[in-house]
Amino acid sequence: MKPQDNKNPAPRVSVVIASYNYAHFVPLAIESALAQTMTDLEIIVVDDGSTDNTREAVAHFAAHPQVCLEHIAHVGHPQAKNHGVRLARGEYVAFLDADDIWQPTKLARQLELFAGRPEVGVVYTRRACIDVAGRALVVEETPLYRGRVVEPLVFDNFVCFSSAMARRSLLGAGGCFDETLNDPIDYDLWLRLALRCQFDYVEEPLVLYRVGHASMSRTNNRWREQVDRVMLRFFVEYGGSEAVAPAVVRRHKYTRWCAMGLAARGHAPRIALANYLRAIACRPWAPTAWYGLAALLVPERGRRWYRRLLGRPADWRQPQLARV
């Protein structure tokens, strides 16, 4: 059957893959979805107007009864992903970036955690990182969380996009990704879903997450601005300020202002100063902003003071709010 044929029974899982100029990688992603031990699925591949040879690279999958190939004009990856979600017919939607790869038991292991638990709306897994050539990389493990994950999610996007599976009923018929954003569309979605359902995760790394190729790089300033937009809407429009403790809201503001101070310290000292002062006004007893302020105003002395007090280098680590 073809996934878009509504005369056939709906599959249990819809896999959505959006691709733009990933001709070298997307066949591997599709093959990893077809290799799943859980076979009641459809695979919706949205080619977002690629200008490379993606069409030729995926053409042979058109004959496969579980694969639906959609070639559309270039609209951007949020719109392309939403197009795939609108075509999905499964009870669950699993996302897979075109440059990533699944392990064969991924979907089966996730469905086990959904079984008999209507309160769980999203199940994700650990990831293992690989480089462009598919070689394993050693990276620091990210703490994962289950249950009500709103508060930890405020500080870190710990859900790997290609590892996530969600109930389609939570995503809405019109799509689920904010098309006004570019970089943190997954983070925005997880925050909204965390207000509505519980999360769970599979401990095994069932996704091979590819890093290091140029097409995945992003402009830090644009990314930071968009994350700030996401967080403002989360707290003001989505009701996030009511879902988390006031102390968590203050700590998030403090963390963001410290991060913005650090980012501006080298090239925009006035902006850095303003952000450090906002952070100090928010949590005057917390040390990080004071250390950053000292490094800004008296750089050498401030760094020495920082090293003496903390016993580590004077760079305050910026939290990565939308890593994946």
Image (cartoon, rainbow, N blue to C red):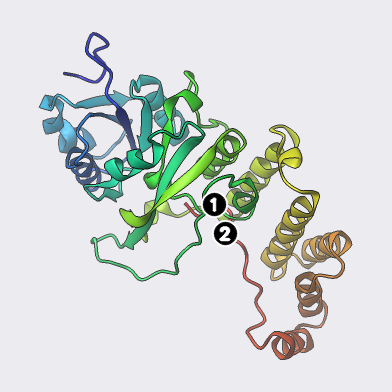
Residue nearer the viewer, 295 or 82:
82
Q: Position of residue 30 (x, y in %)?
A: 22, 39
Q: Does dot 1 land on a helix, a strand or a loop?
A: loop
Disc 2 residue type (three-letter): Gln
Tag nearer the camera, 1 or 2: 1
On screen, residue 312 versus residue 141, left or right, reads right
For the N terminus, the quadrant is top left
Label of residue 320 in the image: 2
| Res 76 visible | yes
Residue nearer the viewer, 126 or 22:
126
Q: Position of residue 39 (x, y in %)?
A: 19, 33
Name which quarter of the figure residue 126 lies in. bottom left
Badge count: 2
Label of residue 157 in the image: 1
| Res 182 visible | no
- The 10 Å Cα crowd at callout 1, few under 14, some 14 to 19, many 20 or more, is many
On screen, residue 114 versus residue 64, left or right, reads right
Q: Measure the alpha-carbon separation of dots 1 and 2.
A: 7 Å
Q: Position of residue 248 (x, y in %)?
A: 74, 53
On screen, residue 31 versus residue 220, left or right, reads left
Point out the tag, 1 or 2, that comes first from the N-terminus: 1
Q: Residue at x 58, y 50 (%)?
A: 223
Disc 1 residue type (three-letter): Asn
Badges 1 and 2: C-beta atoms under 8 Å apart?
yes
Label of residue 33 in the image: none
Q: Position of residue 188 (x, y in %)?
A: 57, 40
| Residue extending furthest toward the top | 7
Rendered position, 5 above or below 115 = above
- The 10 Å Cα crowd at callout 2, few under 14, some 14 to 19, many 20 or more, is few
